[in-house]
Amino acid sequence: MQPTPFRFLLETSESQGQEWLTRYLMNETPNPRVPVPSDIGRLEFLLGEVNPIPELALPLRVGDLAGALLAKAVMAEDRQLRKPDFLKALFTLVESLPVSENVVEFLNMLAISGRLVSWPPADTPDFHLLTLRSLVSHQRPVADDVNRLIDFWKREAQDLRYASISIQGLLRVAPRHAVQIIPDFVDRVLNTPGPMPFANLLFAVSIELGADLQIWQHLVRVLRGDPRVFGATKEGFSRIQLARNNPEAWKLFEMTPSPERALAPEETLVLSIMDPEVQYRPALAHAA
Amino acid sequence: MNLIAIAEHLVSGAARDAATSWLADLSVAADGPIVRHHVEGEANLPSTSEGVEAVRRFAEMLLLRASGHDAVDWYQSLLRHPASDLVVHGPEADSALPQRLCRLMDAWSVRNHLGRDDALPIRSPAAGGGTTVLEDWLRSACSAEYLDFLDPAKFVSGPIPSVFSTFEVDRDATFPTGTTSIRCRQVLGLGPQPTPTAHALLKVQRARVGQARVPTAFDASTHPHFVPPAAGAGCGTTKNLAASDGSGGVREIVVPPFEASRLEQPEFIPR
């Protein structure tokens, strides 16, 4: 493994670092001299190099630079910095890397007031969703703040667009509260027209609950309240290979009888989106 | 291709001097010798009227290059500039070539460009995240449930020439299932990653709109292992770094913008 080419960021001043990161992500000339492989985007190359580093210094440095630029872009409404792709890249860095307390405070503020921010116009990413994703990574629940976070995530989960990520947020601060609202989420997904997979959420549940069998038992218990929801969730977990990754947790589902009622046809459609014959909306692709 | 002679013949003596200066600057710039090698080895462009016209326009642009402007930066900025219209592809590729296209993508690119927006945030190990979460997610995105994890409505895109041109038949012969991403990248002639990551091999079916074309020096840019196709060749090749005699490799064509009617189940490539 070669040394990462981004180490120099530890030696730069705050303003130099911000200026360099802006030019690098915006692909501006003069070209910052970092040998990015030709097939990998600059953001992805930076993430691939900095994210896996177990020591705090460089990941924190890059996370803080991105956080400061994000705050500048939002608070100062700097038009140069408010390009959608650039904002999205900053959110991705902040979400994936460690950040300092002031950036966490900013994310908290943005999560609460973010829907009121004049984000770039339509056809751009959902920046409120990106804010919530970053908060999932960086929320720091101190004793008297946990209840506020629980209320916040539960409120956000009422909107189906943000429900999955909100449950992921809750899983990290109050897993039992998260488990309580999973059946309602699954039920809403099953009643939503068109395919709306929830494998991403189940993947997150599997990661977050880990080997804690007590909380898995709690999940199975609350899911059993609705056989249809239990069946759909069990099938979802079977697809993400919970049985292979966490056999003890999977046993809890296996030991619970399958629901007696068969799924309605429209529910089957939701669960069958892996069917190779199902057609999807065409995606435009560009060779350059 | 003799750029200096073409510039003088089709534009002016000043263009000849500009071409001479640019080629000299390339010789001393980082990645410059690669670009110079591609340009001088290009055989297909001068063989078509469309190609000759592109080279003429390029020679005119050389006249506008400011002295002291990094030769490679200037070239790449020009290629990227939406109004320059200077990326000219070669003749039509052999119509007998397979239409099924593949692209090798690193884990972060799959996650950021094709992943569904409600996916689990991948925290850095330094921020308390696990060291294998990204790879675990990519394995799921490469499972039979890939469409639960990937958003098929998102754009598939990437730099040419190698990314859309790895035919599966070539891939099977050069990196069978289980081959590491490091080896796959070598076979495709892609630069190494300082920190290797897992990759996915994306497969797109029924994806062509318009005619695929043979790549040219313009398409290759700074691609270090691009082999300029001979005049009349049906497609390009990327050198197989492991073959001592230089044989083998993966065929390349240039693909125009296209619609992907179906994204097939990707294949997980370990790091």
Image (cartoon, coloured by chain):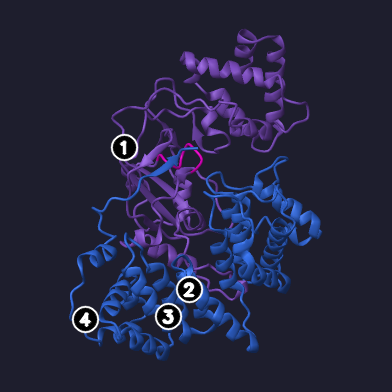
Chain colours: A blue, B purple
Nearer the observer, B92 or A97: A97
Whether the magenta-drawn stretch holds residue A154 is answered as no
- Circle 2 residue: A157
Residue drawn where x is 62% and y is 58% of the image: A2
- Circle 4 residue: A259
Q: CA distance from mark 4 to mark 2?
A: 26 Å
Q: Which mark is residue B99?
A: 1
Whether the magenta-drawn stretch holds residue B160 is answered as yes
Which mark sits nearer the N-terminus, 3 or 4? 3
**Chain holding disc 3:** A
- Is residue B41 shown left or right of residue A269? right
Count neighbours of disc 2 (C-alpha within 10 A) and say few if under 14, some if 14 to 19, many if 20 or more: many
Q: CA distance from mark 2 to mark 1?
A: 44 Å
Instruction: Determine whether the residue tagged by mark 4 lies in a helix, strand or loop.
Output: loop
Residue drawn where x is 51% and y is 59% of the image: B197
Callout 1 amino acid: Gln
Which mark sits nearer the N-terminus, 3 or 2? 2
Q: Are marks 4 and 2 on the same chain?
A: yes
Residue drawn where x is 46% and y is 15% of the image: B48
- Circle 3 residue: A181
Relative to residue A116, is residue B203 depicted above or below?
above
Count neighbours of disc 1 (C-alpha within 10 A) and say few if under 14, some if 14 to 19, many if 20 or more: some
Q: CA distance from mark 3 to mark 1?
A: 47 Å
Count neighbours of disc 3 (C-alpha within 10 A) and say few if under 14, some if 14 to 19, many if 20 or more: some
Nearer the observer, B164 or A112: A112
- Is residue A213 shown left or right of residue B19? left
Report the span colored magenta. Answer: B158-165
Q: Are marks 3 and 2 on the same chain?
A: yes
